[in-house]
Image: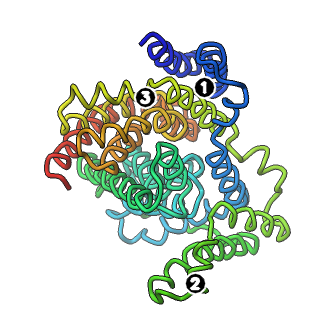
Amino acid sequence: MTINLVILLSIAMAIAFGYMFSINIGMIAIGFAYIIGAFILGLTPSDLIAMWTTKLFFILFTLTTFYGFATTNGTLEKAAAKSIYLFRNLPYFIPLIVFLSSMMLGAIGAGVYAVVAFMVPIVMPVCTKTGMNRVLSILAVITGSTVGDNIPLIGTGGLLIRGIIEKTGYADPSLTPISLGVSGNLALGETSIVLVAYFVLKGWRVSTHDIEKPAPFTSQQRKNLFLIAAVMLCMTMPTFLSVLFPGNTVLSFLRSKADMTLLAVVGAVIAHFLKLGDLKEITTKVVPWNTITVLCGMGLLIGVAVKAGTITMLASFISKNIPPAMTIGLLIVVAGTMSFFASTLAVVAPTLFPIVPIIAHSSGISPALLFGAIYVGSCGTGCSPFSSGGGMALASIADNKIKGETFSKLLLAPPLILVGLTILFVIKGILGV
């Protein structure tokens, strides 16, 4: 019991120290993992290094490198501006177009942070010209990019979540339907957020008379779009054709070899030779090394917690003392509260996902629903100004007065969202759907 309390305290301290002193949480977590693992649990340094989450590291590195070209040369930004302009004659659809545009950009691998970083500066002037509510626009960008980023097989977040779920002990054939279920639950939660916000914040009151026509795609940007489409086709077509032509050995072979991370590496090399961007600059400045360190460092500390039995103890306590339907609500609240101050993929998911298998076994609740509750709760409050999504959105607003007004309004949104999501998914759990 003592060692379990020490580990739980170390996880909390890693998050608190990182937030209070602006130190990378992952580095603190690695330090705690080494002290606890080597000197209390008796693990060897090799045992600890083996816990480093290599697969998650590779996913983030390869995908952000490939899509870094489209980010730095303006391809994705231009695509977003054009999609908004395209629907200028349907003003009441503009907030939903922002949501769908962000979802599209997230789906092609830009990642939530990148989409927020270049969509918010595009949308803020649109809000000034059209009267669109700024909080609604930020929610549309964050929720849309989150849904797109977590599309299975191709989305960066979807691949990362699949990897984190796999670390908890699930493998195919059950892994794929679980990860699909998590993505489906997330899509339900995030879409519900933006639709409710659309009606509460009167998203139909938008005027589009002053939206300017974006410049055409440059030759470089058109090449980048074709390259992204080619990589997407290489990833998805073998699976699609295998469904149409079952039993075809060539298609089955190609499907077994299709991997988004490795295709991204090939795509990045091609992009370099096509002069779509500076590969060295992308790998040093665009790849989110800070997030990678947090994700892998926390994974190392969670690995130590698993070795010590802390995760089993925590899951056992929840399964024995909390009614099944309330368990879903509890996970949403805990994950959402953590996400006020910490990253979903880097901290919340790696910390809470390991308790799911035990709770699922003892309660009979679907693992996809439990994983989904954690992920939905965490992503649902990602608009908090203290969290990654909300913080990046505010950082992208140049006008300090607008930034201050938006900050205070974003503080109110996450608690309301958390209440709504809790009610929605507790009902979902009770109905067993």
Colour scheme shown? rainbow
Could you tell whether 381 is left or right of 164 in the image?
A: left
Please report whichever mark, 3 or 2, sits nearer to the chain's N-terminal start. 2
Q: Residue at x 65, y 13 (%)?
A: 39
Secondary element type, mark 1: helix
Which residue bears the numbered disc 1?
Answer: 25
* Disc sitting over residue 346 in the figure: none
| 340 and 368: which is toward the camera | 368
Q: Amino acid at mark 1?
A: Ile
- Quarter-wise, where is residue 91 in the image? bottom left
Residue 128 seen: no
In front of the other: label 1 or label 2?
Answer: 2
Pinpoint residue 199: horizontal percent, then vertical percent.
24, 52
Q: Amino acid at mark 2?
A: Leu
Pinpoint residue 165: horizontal percent, then vertical percent.
47, 47
Pinpoint residue 147: horizontal percent, then vertical percent.
43, 56
Secondary element type, mark 2: helix
Q: Are marks 1 and 2 in contact (CB under 8 Å)?
A: no
* Disc sitting over residue 311 in the figure: 3
Residue at far left of view: 431
Which residue bears the numbered disc 2?
Answer: 251
